[in-house]
Image (cartoon, rainbow, N blue to C red):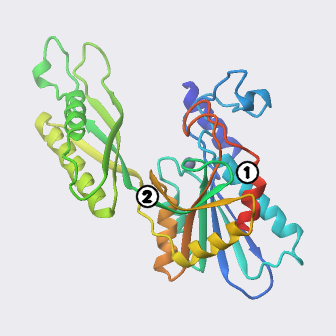
């Protein structure tokens, strides 16, 4: 078993196969239902072992090679737990009525986790839905009330299946899946940009072949497309699907297409943006940034849209943090001093 698979198995066993959690706080008093979402997953990055890296100095760096909280989701989890602790230990005096659902969501990276959480129906009765991210586009003690430019995205795996053959004696009877994958990858990177707005394409992984002297019978692509809105993302999806199909046809290959994750665009409800603005203005340590471009994807948008479709209101905001290293980098480290402020802000 290779090391990466062994780590995954260890984590899976430790978690007993449970990757997410929802805690429901019922105040026992009439009121609205509020859903708070915290993503809790790590990223496939090995954490820096540099002695100057603060988590190394303070002894909380990752213990699993190739797995690291390099995006701050451990901070999100901590904020969620802080809120849970406050609510339960101040039950009579916390002033919270109605129901609070704390949704600890798995698999935001790769935008895979929100869809099954949404389909479970757990946020369907929410009058209000709040989610946030630390860092990214704001410094410590800044709060971006209404970030915009959330890109729609779709993540695909394309698997080409060919026919192996002796590369010297019978190359003509082989069907070359490596060439199918390469052709599709090259074409995908040359898709015309969309005239109406931002689009993205990335072929992130290509794996193919079995051996030097065998016509490659397997080829796999892991790719993603993004678009400023659903129309542009759909355009990108149609292009990559057609190119994969065309490459398969060219080389006589079978093609398996699997959507591995997705996120949609986001429109915050202005009523909640206004409320958040008022709360921030009442906390002297914080500075409100009314709007700032996000230019990323987030699967919280799927939960937000679900709540809005059911008549609820939703907001996604950014809790600023100074960063020692950028998101998804091995020296990522956020400013932990923002955590208590974030708990206070959301409460
Ligand atoms: Zn993140």
Q: Quadrant of residue 56?
A: top right
Q: Relative to 308, is 47 on the left or the right?
A: right
Mark 2 within 8 Å of ligand 1, using the beta carbon: no
Residue 176, placed above or below residue 226: above
Task: Give residue 54's position: percent from left, percent from top.
Answer: 73, 31
How far across and how far down the image is residue 247, in percent? Answer: 16, 38
Residue 186 in sight from this viewpoint? yes
Q: Nearer the viewer, residue 41 or 332?
A: 332
- Front label number (1 vs 2): 1
For the question of whether residue 121 can be seen, the reply is no
Q: Name the foreground residue: 261 vs 297.
A: 297
Circle 1 packing at 10 Å, graded few (<14), some (14-19), many (20+), is many
x 84%, y 68%: residue: 88
Q: Secondary structure at mark 2?
A: strand
- The residue that label 2 is drawn on is 150
Which residue in the structure is indicated by mark 1?
338
- Residue 169 picture quarter: top left
Q: Earlier in the sequence, mark 1 or mark 2?
A: 2
Give x and y (percent) for residue 77. Answer: 69, 53
Secondary element at image label 1:
helix
Residue 277 horizontal side relative to residue 293, left or right: right
Quadrant of res 175? top left
Give above or below for 39 relative to 314: above
Compared to residue 74, the image places residue 286 above or below, namely below
Q: Is mark 1 within 8 Å of ligand 1?
A: no
């Amino acid at each position: 078993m290779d090391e990466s698979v062994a780590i995954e198995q260890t984590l899976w066993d430790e978690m007993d196969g449970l990757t997410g959690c929802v805690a429901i706080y019922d105040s026992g008093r009439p009121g609205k239902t509020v859903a708070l979402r915290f993503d809790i997953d790590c990223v496939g990055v090995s954490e820096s072992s540099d002695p100057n890296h603060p988590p190394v100095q303070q002894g909380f760096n990752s213990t699993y090679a190739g797995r690291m909280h390099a995006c701050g989701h451990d901070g999100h989890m901590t904020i969620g737990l802080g809120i849970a602790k406050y609510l339960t230990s101040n039950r009579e005096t916390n002033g919270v009525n109605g129901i609070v659902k704390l949704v600890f969501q798995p698999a935001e990276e790769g935008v895979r986790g929100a869809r099954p959480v949404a389909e479970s129906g757990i946020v369907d009765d929410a009058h209000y839905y709040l989610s946030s991210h630390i860092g990214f586009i704001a410094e410590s003690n800044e709060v971006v009330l209404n970030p915009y430019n959330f890109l729609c995205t779709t993540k695909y795996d394309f698997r080409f299946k060919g026919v192996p053959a002796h590369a010297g004696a019978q190359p003509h009877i082989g069907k070359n899946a490596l060439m199918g994958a390469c052709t599709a990858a090259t074409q995908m990177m040359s898709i015309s940009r969309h005239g109406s707005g931002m689009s993205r394409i990335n072929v992130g992984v290509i794996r193919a072949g079995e051996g030097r002297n065998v016509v490659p019978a397997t080829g796999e692509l892991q790719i993603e497309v993004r678009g400023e809105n659903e129309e542009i993302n759909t355009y990108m999806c149609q292009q990559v699907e057609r190119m994969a199909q065309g490459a398969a046809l060219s080389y006589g290959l079978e093609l398996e297409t699997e959507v591995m994750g997705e996120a949609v665009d986001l429109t915050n409800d202005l009523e909640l943006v206004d409320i958040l603005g008022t709360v921030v203005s009442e906390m002297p340590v914080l500075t409100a940034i009314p709007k700032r471009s996000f230019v990323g994807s987030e699967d919280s948008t799927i939960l937000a849209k679900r709540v809005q479709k059911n008549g609820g209101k939703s907001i996604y905001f950014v809790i600023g943090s100074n960063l020692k290293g950028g998101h998804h980098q091995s020296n990522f480290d956020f400013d932990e001093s923002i955590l208590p402020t974030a708990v206070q802000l959301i409460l």
